[in-house]
Amino acid sequence: MGCGNLFYTILITFSVALITYNIIISANAPLKQEFPGPSRLSSISVDPIIQMPVDRSKTKKRLFHTAVTASDSVYNTWQCRVMYYWFKKFKNGPSSEMGGFTRILHSGKPDKYMDEIPTFVAQPLPAGVDQGYIVLNRPWAFVQWLQQANIKEDYVLMAEPDHIIVKPIPNLSRDGLGAAFPFFYIEPKKYEPVLRKYFPEGKGAITKIDPIGNSPVIVGKESLKKIVPTWMNVSLEMKKDPETDKAFGWVLEMYAYAVSSALHGVSNILYKDFMIQPPWDTEIKEKFIIHYTYGCDYDMKGKSTYGKIGEWRFDKRSYDNIAPPRNLPLPPPGVPESVVTLVKMVNEATSNIPNWGQ
């Protein structure tokens, strides 16, 4: 027994040391890396924000692998279970180019949902490296996944636990460009003096940095393999810099991905129809994903009370320590279609997922 404990202690110590070494090397690596040549966007005339692909290939499907990073918290776990339920519903639908699915679990150990959701277990950052900003585990988890996993598809969709797929998703990327949702609050031009620390003038105009985060993004797997180590490196550098940390706050890691994509010459077609974010977006129309990041609060007449807890509400943060119950009350009449659809889809998933709430 004593020898077994000694061996286990040595193994754990070696593993932690190896992870810490990799992080230190990445965090201190120079930001100048071997970047590919100029983006193909420079020779292509592309409307920066378009609705749908103009030319959809009718030949061989270009499958993409959906990857979702998550912790083992109750909060992340119930969202992943709902997300995967709807992934399976639409995977084989018309126009779908959805391939495999992986939950990248960065808790460092398996959980009881490994058989329900295809899962890759990644190690979290060593204690203290994230400086209280847990989102930094996301790029580190992707580094491990891309290095160790056997990913059959040539493209990857980076998604999040609080995404619900509402229709089959085609591969929206094309011509060497990624496909990404444009966020109104990612403003590279506004923060040019800060971003020049990471995207020097020699790399080109600040407008080469797209107004995106890492999710939702569909991008070629080989391009992603180049971007992700830089994304981790830039994220750590940004977090260590007080000016950058103050400027970007909770979206720092999103800016880091946008910068890293630009550094590697990977531009993105910006799809406003990629997803909606209730309650601000009120209709589904041609969208592919509902992102329920904001709380939805209404009075019983269907009037929004955003910023104030409503008589009726759905907010994912209400369920940080316990999964939402089955059969949530539907919104009152007058509430937008997007919110009604969101609650109905959560209810369908929870009603059909075995052992919900356990």
Image (spheres, rainbow, N blue to C red):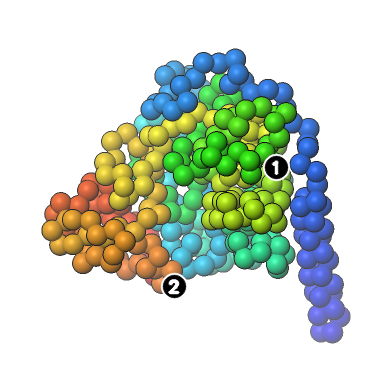
Quadrant into which the C terminus falls: bottom left
Tell which residue pokes out farthest to the bottom in this image: 2
Residue 292's x, y, as percent?
38, 53
Q: Residue at x 18, y 56 (%)?
A: 303
Residue 34's x, y, as percent?
78, 32
- Nearer to us of marks 2 and 1 is 1
Quadrant into which the N terminus falls: bottom right
Rendered position, 20 above or below 234 = below
Residue 187 versus residue 328: which sits nearer the camera? 187
Tell me, yes or no, if residue 85 can be seen here: no
What residue type is disc 1 on? Lys
**Which label number is shown at residue 272?**
none
How far apart are the two marked residues, 2 and 1, measured between alpha carbons?
A: 39 Å
Q: Which residue is mark 1?
A: 197
What residue type is disc 2 on? Asn
Q: Is residue 283 left or right of residue 70?
A: left
Q: Residue at x 24, y 52 (%)?
A: 340
SS for dot 2: loop
Residue 328's x, y, as percent?
26, 64
Q: Is residue 32 left or right of residue 314?
A: right
Quadrant of res 127: bottom right
Crowding near the residue tagged with mark 2, few <14, some 14–19, many ≥20 C-alpha atoms within 10 Å: few
**Which label number is shown at residue 321?**
2
Q: Is residue 206 left or right of residue 294?
A: right
Quadrant of res 10: bottom right
SS for dot 1: loop
Residue 141's x, y, as percent?
65, 53
Q: Earlier in the sequence, mark 2 or mark 1?
A: 1
Quadrant of res 286: top left
Q: Are marks 2 and 1 in contact (CB under 8 Å)?
A: no
Q: Residue at x 70, y 42 (%)?
A: 197
